[in-house]
Image (cartoon, rainbow, N blue to C red):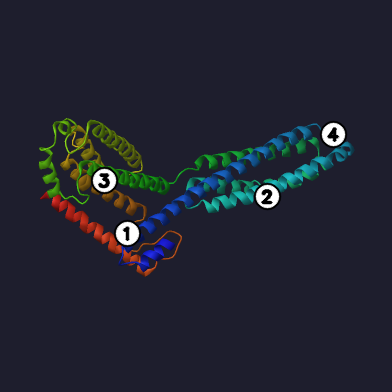
Amino acid sequence: AEAMRRAAANARNNGVAQGVEALDQLRDARRLLDRNRSARLERDAQEALRRVERLAEQQNDMIDDVNDLSDDLRERREAAPPLQERKGSMAEEVAEIEADLDRMARESRQEQRDASRMFEAAARSIRDNQLREKLLWSRGVVQDRSAEYAQNLEAQIGTDIEELQQLVQEGVEAIGETQEQRLGEALDDTRDAVTALESMAERLRQRMGQEPEGTEASAMGQAGQQGQQSQEGQEGGGGGLNREDRRQFTRELREQIQELSELRRELVEEGVDVGELDNVINQMGGMDRRGTIGEALGVALLEDEVIQGLKGFEFNLRRLLQPDADQRLYLSGSDDVPDGYRELVEDYYRELARRRGADSGAVRR
């Protein structure tokens, strides 16, 4: 938030880049909070399940104790108080479990809908079966009613608790990462890949003695200069790279191809259009097959096609996560961002689109 304010006040001095970086940080924080909420829900659900399991064990013990009661009412009344006290504690436990299930169902309704429905069904089963009321009622039954009546009631309570346990178990099993969380992680992986490839391009230029802002024309000039390299340089692949450099950069390229291919598989499972990513992976594969990683034209291809294409894919993936980010720039769960900051980010998006169009035109020419 502080970075956002600085960016808004620093619009003329790289404010757009600072502002977008701040927005990325806020989105990262939001995804972290989402993951924390899922983790907390899972912990709460596991605890609720353990409580229901203990309740089932207590009821099994209760069934055995009630079955052992004498048929003589006088003896039953003498043995009833400890059982009645245990039943009162069980009834209180049921009330607390019901409240927790209602809370979990409510809090998970937006992000964990399947789990929310199961927790809601579990809480409803407590009410529909009148489980708490049966436990309280059975306190009098164990001392005043026949042994058969008491035993039948205890068996019914046991069945109700088994139903509750099954529903809570299904709720626990339904908890998982949401699609938004998975896409957020994919966005992080895409951004990491962009950073790694930019680092690779920068180091390649340094090793080859090129200017960092080389264009396609300058790349052609560098390619001409490669013919004047020493025989050792030519054996190493040209452009000032020796064999070890070439092997290192080739390994890095293949690692990125493998990681992006895995990312593609995950996104296909989420139903995401991966056409842009396919193009990037194909470009990288072509560089690997042709061995152009250490040539000036190869560096230009890495920067103009691969990195820019991956940035475009990252941009569209971000829009998929937040469809209105380039128009209204709302942050989930918060008010609209300040006008000054919104204008900065909109300028950034327009500039990015303009550059992508210009780069595409240059490549075509």
**Residue 95 marker:** 2
Spot occupied by residue 234 in the image (x, y as percentages of width and height) = 15, 33
Q: Mark 2 or 4 closer to N-term? A: 4
CA gap, disc 3 and disc 2: 63 Å
For label 1, the residue is 17
CA gap, disc 4 and disc 1: 83 Å
Instruction: For marks 2 and 1, give the one nearer the viewer.
Output: 1
For label 4, the residue is 71
Instruction: For marks 1 and 3, give the one nearer the viewer.
Output: 3
Q: Mark 3 or 2 closer to N-term? A: 2
Q: Is residue 52 left or right of residue 294?
A: right
Q: Mark 3 or 4 closer to N-term? A: 4
For label 3, the residue is 202
Spot occupied by residue 224 in the image (x, y as percentages of width and height) = 10, 42
Task: Give the mark count.
Answer: 4
Which three-letter amino acid code belongs to the residue tagged 4?
Asp
Which three-letter amino acid code belongs to the residue tagged 2?
Ala
Q: Residue furthest right?
A: 74
CA gap, disc 2 and disc 1: 54 Å
Which three-letter amino acid code belongs to the residue tagged 3?
Glu
Which three-letter amino acid code belongs to the residue tagged 1?
Ala
| Residue drawn at the location 17% of the way across and 34% of the way down | 233
Q: Mark 2 or 1 closer to N-term? A: 1
Q: Nearer the viewer, residue 254 or 280?
A: 254
Q: Quadrant of the N terminus?
A: bottom left
Spot occupied by residue 365 in the image (x, y as percentages of width and height) = 10, 50
CA gap, disc 2 and disc 4: 32 Å
